Image (cartoon, rainbow, N blue to C red):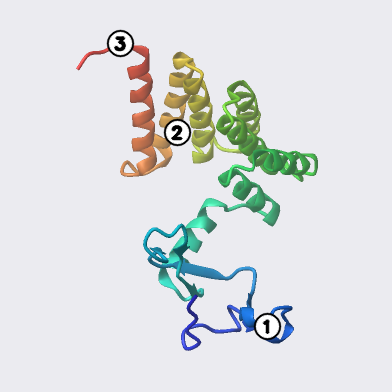
Amino acid sequence: MTIDPSKISTSITPFAMIDNHSALSGEQEVLFTMHTVFRVGEIKQTTEKSCLWEVPLTITDESDPQLAGLTDCIKQEVQGSTGWHRMGKLMLQVGHFDQAEELYNELLDNASDDTDRAHIYHHLGYLKDDQGKYPEAATFYEKSLQICKKILSPDDPNLATSYNSIGQVYNNMGEYSKALEYYEKSLKIKEISLSPTRPDLAASYNNIGQVYISMVPYTV
């Protein structure tokens, strides 16, 4: 384990030698704060034919450009209106579906407005879709869609997202006609509300193409 004091600020990444407080003074223990991040170096076998491997760790901090980039990416993936919503999205990202469902049901019981309810229903749909529980996913997505249709303009991109999600569920269930219907509704909104060079449009074209491939036997 390597720590370069000239590069690491203890105010950002606190750590301390605790030899004098350890039950075994010879262990040379170091206590790190919980959010400490280490860079993993080249992993090597300690000796030939040994079953032990050495993993070199180098402490890093928030000024590390690669760490900053990863942190920004994670923040984008788990955006939410509140800390609880961000926690729910993070749980979904790491596959803690039971905990995420419990949290979203609690948030739903305490939702303050239709926007909040639509958001929660959508993520419950995502959760069920990821679990392969497609009928339940479709139900939650439909609930989100019905709310969005009441509170959003007909060409709002968020409506396109709802239509696309429902289309994906029907595609997963093999109900290709319904999938195509929702994918086309999503595409129609995107063509109105988005720039023609947006990747979202390409994704819709691809989704529709994949449905046609599934519906019609073809040969190469």
Provide residue 162's location: percent of width, then percent of height.
54, 33
Provide residue 181's location: percent of width, then percent of height.
46, 19
Provide residue 16's location: percent of width, then percent of height.
64, 83
Residue kind at label 3, given as amino acid type: Pro
Secondary element under disc 1, as helix, strand or loop, is helix
- Towards the viewer: 55 or 61: 55
183 vs 109: above or below: above
**Distance from Cα at disc 3 to Cα at disc 2:** 29 Å
Provide residue 59's location: percent of width, then percent of height.
50, 75
Q: Is residue 37 left or right of residue 66?
A: right
Q: Residue at x 58, y 71 (%)?
A: 36
Can residue 80 be seen by looking at this rendering?
Answer: yes
Q: Residue at x 38, y 20 (%)?
A: 211
Residue kind at label 1, given as amino acid type: Ser
The mark closer to the camera, 2 or 1, is 1
The image's mark for residue 175 is none
32 vs 10: above or below: above
Residue kind at label 2, given as amino acid type: Ile
Q: Earlier in the sequence, mark 3 or mark 1?
A: 1
Q: Residue at x 51, y 73 (%)?
A: 62
35 vs 30: above or below: above
Secondary element under disc 2, as helix, strand or loop, is helix
Residue extending furthest toward the left: 220
| Neighbours of disc 1 within 10 Å: few (<14), some (14-19), many (20+) | few
The image's mark for residue 217 is 3
The image's mark for residue 25 is 1
Q: Earlier in the sequence, mark 3 or mark 2?
A: 2
Q: Earlier in the sequence, mark 2 or mark 1?
A: 1
The image's mark for residue 189 is 2
Q: Where's the C terminus, which quadrant?
A: top left
Whether label 2 touches label 1, CB < 8 Å: no
The mark closer to the camera, 3 or 1, is 1
